[in-house]
Image (cartoon, rainbow, N blue to C red):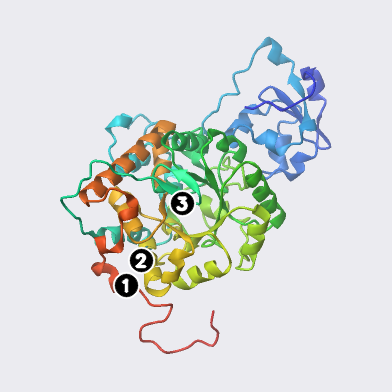
């Protein structure tokens, strides 16, 4: 836990003095042996005042560790709220500063009925999912793996890649292959990045920080979620380029402050989620009670339960502004001063509008099938852009995510004009092994990509083109410019 910057040595405060400050208007607590004045803060604490008042005048470290990632308290409180060090620390040095895992419902591994395989025995992204299914708690796995209602879109995301066939060339010198790519001006060792995914600490005590170190080790870019479990400051210390995913808050001032902070911390671009004005109904997530000790370090969103269930995705999204519209894109661009990508574009008409509103890129995404079920798989939307809005390929960087599990999937998206692809769930599952798991998964995906390129007769990803694919099995599903092929009926009100 990082120390606060102070101009003089900290004072040592005795327990008798600390205990005097246990009232609503005069409240001190101890966290990791540091004494803080939270007299004002507890009234606006995202998790409510009661949990803080329960430890007023005493040590709240254990409760803090259950809920928060290290460093959040320094980020939330003004520096003058740090009062000094608990005097007992001089006599009995504390070991509570270590990052502790969340105390949640035991997984199969914790119950002793599953043996975690050695990392080097995993050879595909699917292997990581199998480990996570056994190793993560039921709630964590349900939160990560769940998708909307009948899982139609979730399943189509991957099945459509299987229906598109490759047309390899032979007798090419493929001894050397390049898979490097520039993404929004940032160098990446591969044409894929880690898509934003919330609350990675459910998978590993170091959550997004482990993701960041793994990405840095392999030279790829991480998109940090607005609902990350660690503060931005902690995550970006890994050093490689980062993008930030933004859910616009109904309190626009909070989003503005986050955008300014992102720029100051060196974030390179903002990915604005536009396909989730409200969360989709994810029944696997709803059926299992939410752990009330799960709180986002960036947005402050907190999980809990209500009469609809315990869906963490739904309950943590209550701050999201469902009034977000095209006119707000300019505000985001001006406030952040960074390149803006719209994440969640699902048709050619909106891709054209994205060009008009001056964004630098779009991400064809259906939220991993987690928002509107029966919405199109992203690779189908990519084909729609070629048919109805081909001009956008020269004006925007275009990314695709959803269902990408293999190197061949990456090849197909790039051959259809994608700048790069995002990969989400597999990276969450790789956190079963921490940063080393992230690096191992990345290495597997790179190896599959290189192998696929060589077998296609390609030595550089810039050589990929649509003629290398047979899309005949899905072409009949590509619509033209938002018009139904034969229905002429018009509603009373048009979008």
Looking at the rendered structure, the number of numbered marks drawn on it comes to 3
Measuring from the top left, give residue 155's x and y in whole percent: 33, 59
Badge 3 element: helix
| Residue 13 drawn above or below residue 31 | above
Closest to the observer, 447 or 175: 175
Would you call the spot at circle 3 few (<14 residues within 10 Å), some (14-19), or many (20 or more)?
many
Q: Which mark is residue 54?
A: none
Q: Which residue is mark 3?
A: 285
Q: Which mark is residue 477?
A: 1
| Residue 111 drawn above or below residue 331 | above
Q: Which residue is mark 2?
A: 380
Would residue 227 appear left or right of 163 to someone viewing this image? right
Identity of the residue furthest to the front in this view? 173
The residue mark sitting in front, 3 or 2, is 2
Quadrant where the C terminus sits is: bottom right
Residue drawn at the location 33% of the way across and 44% of the way down: 178
The residue mark sitting in front, 3 or 1, is 1
State which tag comes first along the sequence, 3 or 2.
3
Residue drawn at the location 40% of the way across and 69% of the way down: 385
| Residue 462 drawn above or below residue 445 | below
Query: In whole angstroms, how far apart are the C-alphas of marks 3 and 1?
Result: 31 Å
Identity of the residue furthest to the bottom in this view? 489
């Amino acid at each position: 836990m990082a120390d606060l910057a102070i101009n003089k040595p900290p004072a040592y405060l005795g327990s008798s003095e600390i205990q005097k400050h246990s009232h609503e208007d005069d409240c001190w607590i101890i966290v990791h042996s540091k004494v803080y004045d939270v007299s004002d803060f507890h009234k606006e604490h995202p998790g409510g005042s009661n949990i803080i008042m329960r430890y007023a005048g005493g040590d709240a470290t254990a409760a803090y560790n259950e809920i928060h990632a290290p460093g959040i308290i320094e980020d939330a409180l003004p520096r003058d709220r740090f009062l000094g060090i608990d005097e007992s620390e001089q006599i009995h040095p504390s070991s509570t500063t270590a990052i502790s895992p969340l105390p949640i419902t035991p997984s199969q591994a914790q119950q002793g009925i599953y043996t975690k395989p050695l990392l080097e025995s995993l050879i595909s992204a699917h292997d990581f999912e199998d480990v996570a299914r056994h190793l993560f708690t039921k709630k964590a796995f349900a939160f990560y793996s769940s998708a909307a209602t009948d899982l139609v879109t979730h399943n189509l995301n991957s099945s459509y890649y299987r229906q598109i066939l490759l047309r390899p060339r032979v007798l090419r010198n493929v001894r050397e292959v390049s898979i490097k790519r520039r993404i929004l001006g940032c160098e990446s060792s591969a044409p894929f990045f880690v898509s934003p995914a919330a609350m990675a600490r459910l998978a590993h005590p170091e959550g997004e920080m482990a993701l960041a170190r793994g990405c840095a080790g392999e030279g790829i870019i991480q998109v940090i979620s607005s609902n990350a479990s660690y503060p931005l400051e902690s995550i970006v210390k890994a050093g490689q380029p980062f993008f930030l995913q933004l859910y616009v808050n109904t309190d626009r001032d909070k989003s503005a402050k986050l955008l300014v902070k992102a720029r100051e911390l060196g974030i390179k671009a903002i990915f604005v989620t536009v396909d989730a004005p409200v969360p989709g109904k994810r029944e696997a997530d709803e059926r299992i009670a939410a752990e009330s000790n799960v709180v986002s370090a960036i947005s402050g969103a907190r999980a809990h339960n209500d009469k609809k269930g315990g869906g963490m995705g739904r309950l943590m999204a209550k701050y999201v502004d469902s009034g977000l519209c095209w006119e707000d894109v300019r505000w985001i661009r001006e406030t952040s001063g960074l390149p803006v990508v719209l994440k969640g574009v699902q048709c050619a008409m909106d891709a054209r509008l994205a060009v008009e509103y001056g964004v630098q890129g779009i991400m064809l995404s259906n939220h991993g099938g987690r928002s509107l079920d029966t919405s199109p798989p992203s690779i189908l939307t990519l084909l729609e852009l070629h048919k109805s809005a081909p001009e956008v390929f020269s004006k925007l960087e275009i990314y695709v995510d959803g269902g990408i599990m293999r190197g061949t999937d990456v090849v197909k998206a790039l051959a259809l004009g994608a700048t790069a692809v995002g990969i989400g769930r597999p990276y969450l599952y790789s956190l079963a092994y921490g940063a080393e798991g992230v690096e191992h998964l990345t290495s597997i995906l790179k190896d599959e990509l290189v192998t696929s390129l060589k077998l296609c007769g390609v030595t550089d990803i810039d050589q990929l083109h649509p003629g290398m694919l047979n899309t005949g099995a899905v072409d009949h599903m590509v619509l033209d410019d938002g018009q139904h092929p034969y229905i002429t009926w018009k509603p009373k009100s048009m979008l």
